[in-house]
Amino acid sequence: MKDTALTSTHIALGAKMVPFAGFNMPVSYEGVNIEHETVRKAVGVFDVSHMGEFLITGENALALIQKIGSNDASKLVDGKAQYSCMPNNEGGIVDDLIIYRFNEEKYLLVVNASNIEKDWNWISQHNTMDATMRDLSDNYSLLAIQGPKAAEAMQSLTSVNLTNIKFYTFEVAEFAGAENVIISATGYTGSGGFEIYVKNEDAQTVWENVFKAGADYGIKPIGLAARDTLRLEMGFCLYGNDIDDTTSPIEAGLGWITKFTKEFVNSEALKEQKEQGPERKLVGFQLEDRGIPRQGYDIVDDSGNIIGTVTSGTMSPSLGTGIGMGYVPAGMATPGCKINIQVRKKALPATVVKMPFYKG
């Protein structure tokens, strides 16, 4: 089990620790609902240092990224980030990722913790153009400072005007006493804020300064459980739940990051699937009765026939009702369609809804 640079800090704060993607991670401190509300209304800090970071450099860096990624990275300019995914050859997804462009020959790929080795091998295998690859995953810590008060609370820690960093753009600057910090207006909560990439040796200092600066804004540490409820309320896919090696980006509603203006791994087959329409689609649903849908529960029709599976589900802290995502036949994927979620021995009625669930 790997520790992050801040594991001992989380334990000292009384966090409940769990194994996650090979790391010892804080799942909660005070409780999911309190932590969830803190991020929606104020500012909270997640340690997401388990994520992987690959530096891709050289004159063929973009060519490699264009080959493995579904999105069109040629549209990126310096200081801009882009959400993308890496299709495999079988119609599924190797991983989803964020691409950061520093300049035309320097990019950072941020990948999921559980896929670091798999992604590295996959990208290496396709690196026929000799782009330079470096795995920085063990050297960097990542803090997600999320919530509507994030910019105001953190402004004293940097000379960069945080409100000027627009969504999916970033700056490299001094932050919270550390040099060369990537300050990125990204995150997986839907409540605004920043993701801060710092060297491991600076992580403790940055953490302490962040909490001092945020003291008057109700800042709190937030665990992985609230991260999951926050991202699910936004309808954001989680790799291993809603997308994996067997789900295509077209089925998963990720057609918007799948650009057929260029060739990439399995692009022909995915283009054909888009044109013909997928047989199944990932949908959001809301329970009509009390109950909590969980990953792995069956989705059934009115006759009790299994038509799909819940990929993510929870009791939404913001809405006070059971919400989830799952794959259903394309004909039942329209908002307003009625489905049922098999919760133990009961088939609970649910309605397919347009995501995000939480409108803010």
Image (cartoon, helix red, strand yellow):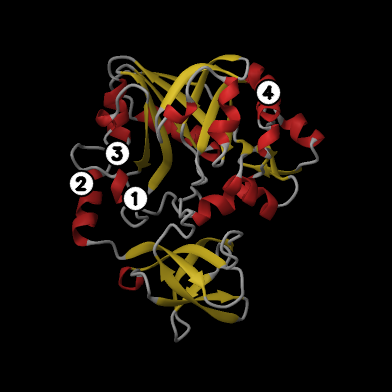
Marks 4 and 3, how far apart at CA: 36 Å
Q: Nearer the viewer, residue 125 or 142?
A: 142
Q: Are discs 3 and 2 less than 8 Å apart at CB? A: no
Residue under label 4: 209
Q: Quadrant of the N terminus?
A: top right
> What amino acid is at disc 4?
Asn
Mark 1, other Cα within 10 Å: few <14 / some 14–19 / many ≥20? some
The residue tagged with tag 3: helix, strand or loop?
A: loop
Residue under label 1: 254
Q: Are discs 2 and 4 less than 8 Å apart at CB? A: no
- Residue at 32 percent across and 16 percent down: it is 105
100 vs 187, left or right, is: left
> What amino acid is at disc 3?
Asn
Residue 93 at x, y = what percent? 39, 46
Residue 340 at x, y = what percent? 49, 77
- Residue at 63 percent across and 51 percent down: it is 37
Q: Which mark is residue 268?
A: 2
Q: Nearer the viewer, residue 354 or 271?
A: 354
Residue under label 3: 71
